[in-house]
């Protein structure tokens, strides 16, 4: 563009804002003209990878020392696509665990810990990896941008006092980490910020701890397993605001592995009743469960949701594919004892850890496209995206 004044231009400022004017998506550019006319030819860099596709407005303001004049131009910004940066694997190493990342066709180690391992999750928004100990109780954040430790939260109670059960799950709605831990009387589920600060606390039922969770814009949905043997798991609904207990029911098996949102009123709940795998659908309207299929004899190790209707279950007999509607349950593979699963929703590859092998499956056919070997048994597979 061109700015003109009858005497002299002092400054020209360029801004890029959301249409409501509340969000600035680029650093303002300030130009210093030397005369009364100035031809504007400037680049503006949108540096925030979280900028979403939307309509925005470029605002150019010219100032002559006394008066200001603005011009406006509507633009459309296309966000950066989400892409997989690398696969991260947590594996056994002696009495502790190690964390490796995939580079090319091989895994390279970048974290080693002597403590035990309970779970891992990731915040791609904050570019942080989280992992927790089971009886050691330590929760740690790793900065994936700088490839160095970010912060560590020590155990809440001595490991010798009572068994600790640590779970970590990242809430993409609230952009916060949920951490589960056991105390003498029961379990607590709390939020941990990207800076390592504690937020809200949810107290579990007596002698239970949070073993799995999912979330919507309104609810945190928690599966509570018994701390020790025996007892039934509880399914509890908690509001995101206020954290009041909304609804609780007894799950008809004693260990929940995963919860998935089927619809606005239904959940798919997968777990084990002792050594028998279970799959039930929970209906919020009736506050009860119904069973569509009996799983084969054997335990469930893990599960992933492909979409609202399709689920892959890592079962003792192999990989099972459950379709809710039309109702179907098939053996996707037979004899492949995957212990952990993760689905790359962007490439469509289902990653499975089977002992020291990581396999990439087609979740529709069970076809294996890629196989990698790691140094020891796989405990978790984490997918690191650019945002």
Image (cartoon, rainbow, N blue to C red):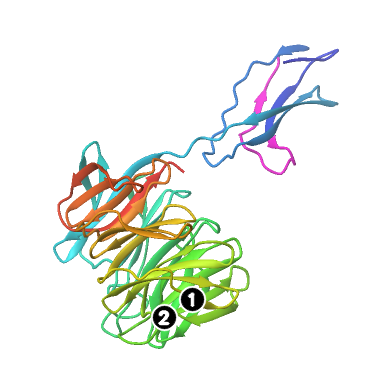
Residue at image position (35%, 82%) is: 227
Residue 157 place in picture, x, y as percent: 34, 80
Residue at image position (84%, 13%) is: 7
Residue 170 place in picture, x, y as percent: 45, 59
Label the magenta part by its dominant secondary structure. Answer: loop
Callout 1: SS = strand
Vertical placement of residue 341 versus 349, above or below: below
Q: Nearer the viewer, residue 85 or 370?
A: 370
Vertical placement of residue 224 versus 192, above or below: below
Callout 2: SS = loop
Residue 96, label in figure: none
Binning the other alpha carbons within 10 Å of mark 2 as few (below 14), some (14 to 19) or many (20 upward) gives some
Residue 252, label in figure: 2
Segment colored magenta: 17-33
Which quadrant holds residue 39? Answer: top right
Q: Earlier in the sequence, mark 2 or mark 1?
A: 2
Binning the other alpha carbons within 10 Å of mark 1 as few (below 14), some (14 to 19) or many (20 upward) gives many
Residue 289, label in figure: 1
Vertical placement of residue 214 versus 272, above or below: above
Which quadrant holds residue 231? Answer: bottom left
């Amino acid at each position: 563009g061109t700015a003109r004044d009858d005497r002299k231009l002092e400054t020209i400022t360029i801004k890029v804002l959301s249409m409501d004017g509340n969000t600035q998506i680029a650093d303002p550019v300030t130009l210093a003209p030397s005369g009364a006319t100035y031809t504007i030819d400037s680049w503006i860099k949108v540096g925030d990878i979280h900028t979403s596709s939307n309509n925005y407005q470029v605002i150019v303001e010219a100032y002559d020392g006394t008066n200001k004049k603005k011009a406006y131009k509507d633009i459309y910004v296309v966000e950066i696509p989400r892409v997989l940066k690398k696969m991260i694997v947590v594996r056994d190493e002696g009495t502790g665990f190690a964390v490796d990342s995939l580079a090319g066709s091989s895994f390279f180690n970048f974290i080693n810990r002597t403590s035990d391992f309970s779970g891992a999750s990731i915040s791609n928004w904050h570019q942080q990896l989280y992992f927790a100990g089971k009886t050691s109780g330590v929760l740690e954040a790793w900065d994936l941008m700088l490839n160095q430790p970010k912060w560590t939260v020590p155990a809440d109670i001595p490991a010798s006092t009572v068994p600790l059960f640590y779970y970590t799950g990242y809430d993409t709605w609230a952009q916060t980490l949920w951490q589960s831990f056991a105390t003498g009387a029961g379990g607590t589920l709390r939020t941990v910020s990207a800076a390592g600060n504690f937020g809200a606390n949810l107290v579990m039922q007596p002698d239970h701890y949070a073993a799995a969770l999912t979330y919507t814009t309104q609810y945190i949905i928690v599966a509570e397993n018994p701390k020790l043997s025996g007892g039934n798991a509880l399914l509890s609904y908690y509001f995101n605001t206020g954290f009041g207990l909304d609804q609780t029911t007894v799950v008809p098996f004693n260990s929940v592995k995963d919860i998935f949102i089927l619809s606005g009123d239904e959940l798919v709940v997968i777990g084990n009743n002792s050594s028998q795998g279970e799959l039930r659908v929970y209906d919020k309207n009736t506050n009860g469960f119904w069973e569509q299929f009996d799983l084969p004899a054997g335990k469930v190790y893990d599960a992933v949701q492909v979409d609202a209707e399709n689920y892959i279950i890592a079962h003792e007999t192999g990989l099972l594919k459950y379709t809710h509607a039309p109702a179907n349950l098939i053996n996707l593979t037979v004899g492949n004892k995957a212990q952990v699963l993760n689905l790359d929703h962007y490439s469509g590859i289902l990653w499975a850890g089977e002992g020291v092998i990581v396999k990439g499956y087609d979740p529709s056919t069970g076809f294996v496209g890629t196989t990698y070997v790691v140094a020891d048994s796989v405990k978790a597979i984490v997918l690191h995206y650019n945002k």
